[in-house]
Image: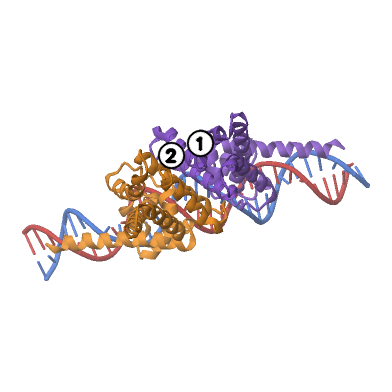
Chain colours: A orange, B purple, C blue, D red
DNA sequence: TCATATAATCTAGCATTGCTAGGATGTCAA
DNA sequence: TTGACATCCTAGCAATGCTAGATTATATGA
């Protein structure tokens, strides 16, 4: 019978509306404005309904973070694909990463700063994260012997640049120069 | 009259006890355990007393962060001084940075992750932060043309490594290899 | 068609948080 | 001793995450 399907579909849609509302409010007013009451009001249901979808508030943040991992993975892959060669690919991925992080600060915050309880051990979230990481690792591989370690270091450099700039600790105007240095460190390791 | 001096000294001591208690609880149980009530109980005064010392809770976190900036500055300078040459200095500073960050995770969290309201524009905090940054910049200068930009990138790489490892996103065992890569990127830029 | 069991949802409230108003208590000079 | 001032505490507010229990809607059987 289609009743059960309709119900579960409506449930999934409502869940998606919760995540979307959380993300929108966070991006517009910051994560501290994302309260359970506010979300309940937004989707026009009472608060306990939210707890039938998510265990707690941080699980909602985690759901937004997973969206972010999925999207940044696509963005990075797309940047790598469009590049003319391996060196350009590193450059394109690096810039795409920073554009993404600083273009969606609240989303990036959910992914890397806020406590999310997603311990990178669950099957689903690991897949999203792994895919994003692989996009980074892919462009680094041609230049380094130990690709896994190099990818981690590359990722760390980009993450550090994003975080320090996002929190106003380094000069915003010099982003291009800093990225160029990091890219040079990766690409120039052999040449 | 020495009465006023005694009073202001006692006040300063009490303030220091607040900061020390906050730091100790955070390092032992995490920052979410650092509540104003808990701190009041710890120093054996009522809550409003805390608000005669600090504007709000985040100002207490900021005070702990300033302590952290002071200490990491000393640690990095000491590491640089003990090193045998400029290349070794970069390596020593990089390892000292990560040891500090991962050895005092709550302190590092106060410095870089938690919202602190210290906008790096106030005279005092700027001095502490600037001193720490200069310790980083100092060891990078011999190897790079644009030292300021290089120092920012170096800092970002170390911060990224610290954060990704602290939050369990990269393998803990490979720290040495990653640091070596970063150091090589700085030192090897000329050689 | 209607009664009933089940599922879905809401109302109301708890405990905890950061923060503050207003009263009580101590302290010091005149 | 008294009055003015500083110091401190009690008590409480509003907001938060979360939940128990009542209430309403929905589907299923006779």
Q: Is residue A70 above or below residue B78?
A: below
Q: Subunit of mark 1? A: B
Q: Secondary structure at mark 2?
A: helix
Q: Is residue B62 above or below residue B175?
A: below
Whole-percent x, y for residue A146 in the image: 35, 38
Q: Is residue A41 above or below residue B90?
A: below
Whole-percent x, y for residue A156 in the image: 44, 45
Q: Secondary structure at mark 1?
A: helix
10 Å crowding of disc 2: few (<14), some (14-19), many (20+): many
Whole-percent x, y for residue B175 in the image: 43, 34
Label located before the other in sequence (1 or 2)? 1
Q: CB of mark 1 within 8 Å of CB of mark 2?
A: yes
Which one is in front, B137 or A5? B137
Labels 1 and 2 within one chain? yes
User: Is residue B138 among what the camera can see?
Assistant: yes
Left/right of residue B46 with respect to residue D5 in the rendered view: left
The residue located at (58%, 48%) in the rendering is B145
User: Is residue A34 among what the camera can see?
Assistant: no
Q: Quadrant of residue B167?
A: top left
Which one is in front, B169 or B65? B169
Q: Is residue B110 above or below residue A16?
A: above
Which one is in front, B70 or B110? B70
Location of the N terminus of chain B by quadrant is top right
Mark number for residue B165?
A: 2
Whole-percent x, y for residue B40 in the image: 61, 40
Q: Subunit of mark 2? A: B
The residue located at (43%, 39%) in the rendering is B165
Which residue was labeled with disc 1?
Answer: B98
Mark 1 and mark 2: Cα distance apart in space: 10 Å
């Amino acid at each position: 019978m289609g009743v059960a399907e309709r119900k579960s579909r409506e449930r999934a849609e409502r869940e998606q509306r919760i995540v979307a509302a959380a993300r929108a409010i966070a991006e517009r007013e910051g994560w501290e404005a994302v309260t359970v009451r506010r979300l309940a009001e937004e989707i026009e249901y009472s608060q306990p309904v939210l707890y039938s979808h998510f265990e707690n508030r941080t699980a909602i943040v985690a759901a937004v973070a997973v969206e972010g991992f999925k999207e940044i993975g696509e963005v990075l892959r797309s940047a790598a694909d469009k590049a003319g060669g391996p060196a350009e690919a590193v450059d394109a991925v690096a810039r795409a990463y920073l554009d993404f992080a600083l273009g969606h600060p609240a989303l990036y915050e959910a992914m890397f700063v806020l406590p999310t309880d997603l311990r990178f051990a669950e099957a689903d979230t690991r897949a999203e994260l792994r895919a994003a990481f692989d996009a980074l690792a892919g462009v680094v591989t041609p230049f380094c012997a130990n690709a896994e370690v190099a990818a981690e270091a590359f990722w760390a450099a980009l993450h550090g640049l994003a975080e320090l700039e996002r929190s106003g600790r380094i000069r915003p105007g010099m982003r291009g120069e800093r990225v160029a240095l990091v890219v040079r460190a990766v690409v120039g390791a052999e040449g």
